[in-house]
Image (cartoon, rainbow, N blue to C red):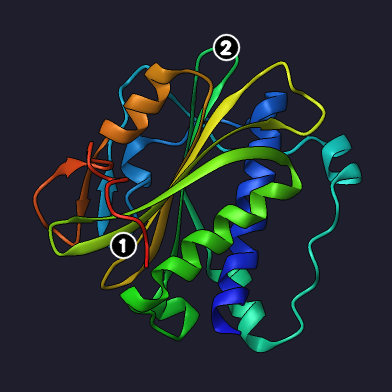
């Protein structure tokens, strides 16, 4: 039950941001120093990516299916504690990168690496409401002392087959929280930027987020 609560929150956060990004409904950019947070990681993108804050238009708010209201204290905590750490976009059609995190001190519970597959796969499943996804592939890899779960699929927004994307999600557990990095890449160059963005996890050495061997080992 605990994992489904977190998955549902992350699913809806990602869906809302992606819908807003496709319509160009963005607010003002946030300063880079405001993005790191206190979860225990950093992540860098090139300066030509626009850091944005997604704000769905009033029409999208009216037509988007409502998120089920939290019915337990655990669900309320999960909804309140999820943090969108970074939203960035580049090019036309726009490629998008989103980073979300759940601080354990806010949520009141911790998770372990055993929860990683459920977290990642549940988050990815949430996109199927808005995307037609095909040919998914999965992997497990390690950065320093941190295991990461990853999924990659091809797809398009429902009703908009003219633009094909690569959707990729990587998730990890940190000392202070859970984090997921996601891209909706419209081209190979944007996918490479997402994967090669340098990340630090709990103060360990900086490394590209997704190594070339990320899909060599399938999750068990």
Work out whether residue 176 or residue 186 is closer to the camera in this orientation and state it.
Answer: 186
Labelled disc at residue 38: 1
Q: Residue at x 41, y 19 (%)?
A: 188
Work out whether residue 190 or residue 107 is closer to the camera in this orientation and state it.
Answer: 190
Q: Residue at x 56, y 83 (%)?
A: 2
Label 1–label 2 contact, CB within 8 A? no
x, y (%) of residue 169?
Answer: 45, 47
x, y (%) of residue 22?
Answer: 68, 27
Work out whether residue 44 or residue 142 is closer to the camera in this orientation and state it.
Answer: 142
Which residue is the site of mark 2? 92
> Is residue 98 shown to the viewer in this render?
no
Q: Quadrant of residue 207?
A: top left
Check the image and name the residue furthest to the top. 92
Labelled disc at residue 176: none
Instruction: Specify whether 23 is left or right of 178.
Output: right
Q: Earlier in the sequence, mark 1 or mark 2?
A: 1
Front disc: 1 or 2: 2
Q: Determine whether the residue tagged by mark 1 lies in a helix, strand or loop.
A: loop
Question: Is 35 rendered above or below residue 46?
Answer: below
Work out how far the residue at label 1 is from the one at label 2, CA to CA, in angstroms: 33 Å
Q: Residue at x 38, y 82 (%)?
A: 110
x, y (%) of residue 123?
Answer: 56, 58
Crowding around mark 2 (Cα neighbors within 10 Å: few <14, some 14 to 19, many 20+) is few
Q: How many marks?
A: 2
Question: Is 173 rendered above or below residue 104?
Answer: above
């Amino acid at each position: 039950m605990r994992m489904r609560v977190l998955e549902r929150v992350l699913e809806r956060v990602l869906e809302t941001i992606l819908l807003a990004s496709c319509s160009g409904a963005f607010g003002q950019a946030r300063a880079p120093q405001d993005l790191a947070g206190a979860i225990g990681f950093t992540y860098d993108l090139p300066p030509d990516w626009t850091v944005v804050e997604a704000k769905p238009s009033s029409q999208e708010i009216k037509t988007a299916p409502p998120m089920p209201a939290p019915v337990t204290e655990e669900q309320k905590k999960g909804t309140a504690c999820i943090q969108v750490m970074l939203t960035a976009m580049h090019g036309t059609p726009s490629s998008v990168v989103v980073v979300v995190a759940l601080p354990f001190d806010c949520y009141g519970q911790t998770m372990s690496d055993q929860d990683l597959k459920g977290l990642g796969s549940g988050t990815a499943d949430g996109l199927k409401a808005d995307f037609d996804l095909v040919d998914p592939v999965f992997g497990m890899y390690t950065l320093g002392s941190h295991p990461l779960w990853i999924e990659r699929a091809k797809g398009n927004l429902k009703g908009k087959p003219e633009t094909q994307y690569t959707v990729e999600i990587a998730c990890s557990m940190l000392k202070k929280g859970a984090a997921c990095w996601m891209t909706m890449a419209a081209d190979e160059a944007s996918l490479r930027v997402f994967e090669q963005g340098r990340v630090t996890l709990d103060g360990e050495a900086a490394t590209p987020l997704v190594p070339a061997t990320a899909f060599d080992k399938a999750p068990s």
